[in-house]
Image (spheres, rainbow, N blue to C red):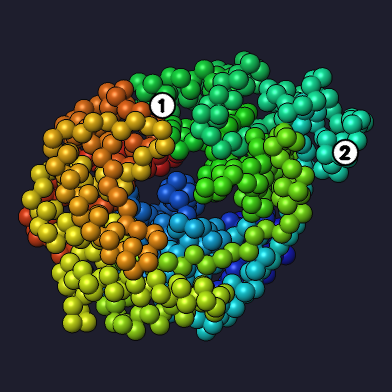
Amino acid sequence: MKSIQLDEFQQAAIAAVEANQSVLVSAPTGTGKTLIAEYLIEKNLTLDRGVIYTAPIKALSNQKFREFERLFPGKVGIITGDVSINPRAPLLIMTTEIFRNKVLEIESTLDKHNWIIFDEIHYLDNVERGTVWEESLIFLPQQMRFLGLSATIPNVDQFADWLREIHKHPITIIKETNRPVPLHFLFQCGNVIYQDLETLKKTVYSKRKKLYFDKGEILREDFYGEGRTIDLIEHLDRNDRLPCIYFSFSRKRCEFLAQEATAIGFLTEEERLKILELYDTFCLQYNLEGEERTQSVRPLVEKGVAYHHAGIHPMLKEILERLFTEKLIKIIFVTETFALGVNMPARTVVMDEVKKKYGRFFRALKVRDFFQMAGRSGRRGIDKEGFVYSRLNPRQVTLRELESIFFNSPEKIRSRFNASYATILNLYETYGDGLLDIYQRSFHYFQEKTFTGSRQLERMEARLKILKQLGYIHKNQLTEKGHFAKKMYGSELPMAELYGYGVLEDLSLRQLGILALAAVFEPRPGVKKPKPGDEVKTLEKITTQVIKGIHRFEKKMGITYVSKRFYYDLSASIMDWMEQKSFNKLMEELQIDEGEVIRYYRMSLQILREMLETPASNSFKAKIYRVIDLIDRGVIDAEEQLRKSVSISDS
């Protein structure tokens, strides 16, 4: 690693790594945590020791693969549900789910890896996927040490105490509260820019009718609502506060605001010509030049503007990311997932609103979520200071809600331990009925040790009883159906029941593709369901009966998170795709974004690949391979896209 001046917290973390101690780093976004990971990787590769790097989302895994391949050429591999490149490499990048699955295998392939890096380890608090992080930590191989990188965790000491209790090896905690680039928090309200929260409080939120603007910049004589976005963007441009990442929680609003921002000219003529040349070249290299969205985004790019969300083609997102890092896109409108993954800091961050939907409720942003996004402002080594603007409507956001974000500590991480059927089956092979004792090693048990803890144990017991009653376990051994289900994370019972009834083996190639897609698809609210054909109706009838049977057992046992239903909304599209229809033609007949279609098709491929690891017959597996070949082509082929991405990055 090049000789650079390290901060004290970085030095302390590296010293702990040198002492072969596991390390938890709790520090704000933008402080330089990644440098510690790079040091650890370089050190271990020099000593011919393996390292695993896990990330919470596939986009971040792909980005890290490209970055590390440049830093450590020929020594990097990646394994996700979509991609497997150089899987025996000393530096392996994985999604956390893939790592969890590997540590639960009886014959582990991780013996040569001495370290694992958990990026965004506070994701353990995620309601839907947090249990994967917890299970990964509980069953961490004995020879492994870990480096956990996180945004600020108030209860990091409790977290470390739990890990020390279950692993019996030294764990060093590194806490850093300062950012090398200080942040300034400003507010747009009623088309006035307020320089601090106190001024905002005294004017907008005071009971006095008179408004004070001596410390605010008046953008327009309109003192109600949150003000016009375009006025704020002009303010940023006028005050040299670009580039900017603008967060919104709606895809449609991101697109609308990006279109609105083109009214401002951000680029010089030289920059305009350069960005168009790069954009057209990249689109040609990625075979995107004929895509409808590619053409609609081009006029935005020409003005130095873009939007970025999960509905966009993954390769188009990558193009826009590269143009932003080239400092040619001056403002990019993004959804919140952008804060988790892509490493694209800016001078300024704007929050379109400070409330969002959490589950069924609309509430003020969590402190951790707000500062995860805010932390993208202020580029280390480039900016002396960063700026964070929050757009407010005082009729919609109370002072108490606002103060909860700025004055409360970040939320403590809580256990979301919720062992799945597949996890229980894998554990049963090793521990038998003693697997229930595993619960006492969980963070949930460590935190609770109360009635809520016993309820969690009861859920595990209920799932184990269901597995026995449905014939997955017999005479203390996994049955063939049990061995099938233990490989099917997320759809284990429905797929295993279909396998047990002999339905899967009798499906045609087309039906198998339809079924895999229906197992992963989730319809968006308000989108009309298409009428299914006879072939789909038959499959839907069978799977509905199977799901109802599973749900009866689950509800009887008091399980609230029941097995997922099958949704056949995209069945016609997958049939057309398997018959070699072009992706552009496919999208003309669909009501959802291309990025979603690609994601769901890739998730269906993951289901099919999991089936290849089961005890199914060779003839059935041959059928699966043929279905995979029919689906995994063109824009759906994630591995081909990633290889192309790496080659283009190197050129």
Out of 263 and 453, give the one closest to the viewer. 453
Task: State the mark number for residue 207.
Answer: 2
Taking the image as drawn, is residue 268 in sight? no
Quadrant including the N terminus? bottom right
Nearer mark to the viewer, of 1 and 2:
2
How packed mark 2 is, by other alpha carbons closer than 10 Å (few <14, some 14-19, many 20 or more), is: few
Q: Position of residue 117 (x, y in %)?
A: 50, 64
Q: Position of residue 483 (x, y in %)?
A: 20, 68
Amino acid type of the residue that numbered disc 1 sits on in the rendered structure: Cys
Q: Position of residue 109 (x, y in %)?
A: 32, 70
Taking the image as drawn, is residue 299 in sight? yes
| Residue annotated with mark 1 | 283
Side of 141 relative to 26 (left or right): left
**Image vertical order of residue 312 relative to residue 48, above or below:** above
Out of 323 and 577, give the one closest to the viewer. 577
Identity of the residue drawn at 37% across and 64% down: 559
Identity of the residue drawn at 14% across and 42% down: 538
Give the structural element (helix, strand or loop) at label 1: helix
How packed mark 1 is, by other alpha carbons closer than 10 Å (few <14, some 14-19, many 20 or more), is: some
**Image vertical order of residue 640 relative to residue 424, above or below:** above
Task: State the mark number for residue 373.
Answer: none
